Image: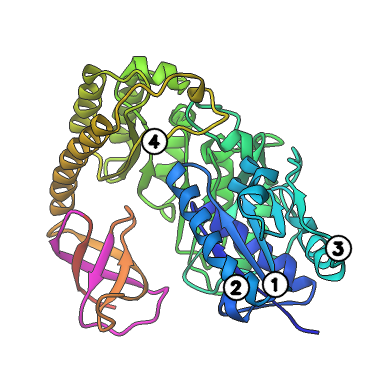
Amino acid sequence: MERRVFIETYGCQMNVADTELMFGLLRHKGFQVAESAEEADVVLLNTCAVRERAEERILGRLGWYKALKSERPDVVLGVAGCMAERMRESLVQKAKHVDLVIGPDAYRRLPELIESLQEDETNDYQVDVRLDRKEMYQEVQVDRVPGVSGWISVQRGCDKFCSFCIVPFVRGRERSLPPEEVVRQAREMAGSGFREVTLLGQTVSSYYERGFDFSDLLTQVHEVEGLERIRYTSPYPNDFSNRLLDTLASLPKVGRHIHLPVQSGSTAVLKDMRRAYTAEKFMDLIDRVRERLPLHGLTTDIIVGYPGETEEDFQLTLDLVREVRFDGAFMFAYSEREGTLAARKRDDIDDSIKKDRLRRLIDVQEGISKEKFGEMVGRECEILIQGPSRRNVENLIGRTSCFKTTIIEGIDVQPGTMVPVKIVGSTSHTLFGEVQSV
């Protein structure tokens, strides 16, 4: 009997990669991919727990699936990923129609858990959220979505234990995939038509396995024939040695873009966040990046309204943003996560203050982004074409090496092609290019 599975994915690129992993494990056991939940025998939500709003959205989505379960009670409804790990059996109490709760380290057991639910009608639900300090899913055939860009999870878990972050508790301790396995997957992807690969890890620059550090890993992946670009996310500021910066400068296929999450411009707040660097040390890193990698784009993550953050602390964040001049930023108001160290503190910043600080920060960064993108006008860049633009299918969309989205008119080339263009226009988030030659 054909069994069909549908997976909805929420959250970061790591979850996207895990969805492909789950599809691979299930396809190996005879499952087929369903185009919609209505056509599926198994529906899984691969979830995020980083912010409260993400969990609220998923709980709302589970409410929507209650009607599907009423119409077709034989459908297996499961919650996977970080939210499953964090909430565990309480998730089944909130949504009693959920059949399966499975954490990020238990995906090898996913097929047998589904089969036990389908075969045993007295089995109300299954929960498997055991963390495994060794699980890296080696030798699993990942069912990647065909395209130009793909992912390799080279590191899982996190050892940093930042006070605001739930990730170490839901994804376990840090461990790295052996370099030969990373290279094998990169070669397989290149042979399947992928032209860009992104190396994923919670703190990917901390990668270390049997004497190989992140510099060594980038060097080995760079040698894979067929790849045009290599990216990585998300690094941790303390891991950027001069050796790594020099390695980045020496590898032309590695994208000229670094995402450096600063979180705050206040050393006092950073200390409370357990970020292991000061604002001054972060600025020293920026100076070293600018010296060795002058053409690299810089982006960041920033949290406002962290417990105890004063207006003076917030002003220090604005000052840092103005001084660094990031190309872009992911900016958030603090969201308390039960179980984190920060949750032991009183969330003493009123929501109205958080919203006001976030608005002011966005205004500053948007102005800088508009200027930074405008500085690209007149430059010549190589764009890796992703495919048709969603807004106008007659235009193509791609990205520069420094990770800026670029729209190109009047060109007919296949996705995955590297196209030289001259930048002729910009907004605060997009470049517009004219083809020089193909």
Label 4 sits on a secondary structure element that is loop
What distance separates the C-alpha of mark 3 from that of mark 2?
20 Å
Residue 75 disc label: 1
Q: Please report whichever mark, 4 or 2, sits nearer to the chain's N-terminal start.
A: 2
Give the vertical position of 100 relative to 387 (above or below).
above
Give me the residue at 57% from left, 80% from top: 35
Give me the residue at 70% from left, 46% from top: 178
Provide the residue designation for mark 3.
122
Q: Please report whichever mark, 1 or 2, sits nearer to the chain's N-terminal start.
A: 2
Residue 261 disc label: 4
Q: Are marks 4 and 2 in contact (CB under 8 Å)?
A: no
Q: Are marks 1 and 2 in contact (CB under 8 Å)?
A: yes
Specify the segment rendered in magenta: 405-428
Q: Nearer the observer, disc 4 or disc 2?
A: 2
Q: Please report whichever mark, 1 or 4, sits nearer to the chain's N-terminal start.
A: 1
Q: Please report whichever mark, 3 or 4, sits nearer to the chain's N-terminal start.
A: 3
Few, some or many residues within 10 Å of mark 4 (<14, 14–19, 20+):
some
Is residue 197 shown left or right of residue 103?
left
Label 2 sits on a secondary structure element that is helix
Q: Residue 291 at what x, y percent from top left?
A: 29, 33
Is 354 inside the magenta-drawn segment? no
Q: Nearer the observer, disc 3 or disc 1?
A: 3
Q: Amino acid at mark 4?
A: Pro
Residue 68 disc label: 2
Q: Quadrant of residue 201?
A: top right
Q: Residue 85 at what x, y percent from top left?
A: 65, 44
Q: Are marks 3 and 1 in contact (CB under 8 Å)?
A: no
Q: Please report whichever mark, 3 or 2, sits nearer to the chain's N-terminal start.
A: 2
What distance separates the C-alpha of mark 3 from that of mark 4?
48 Å
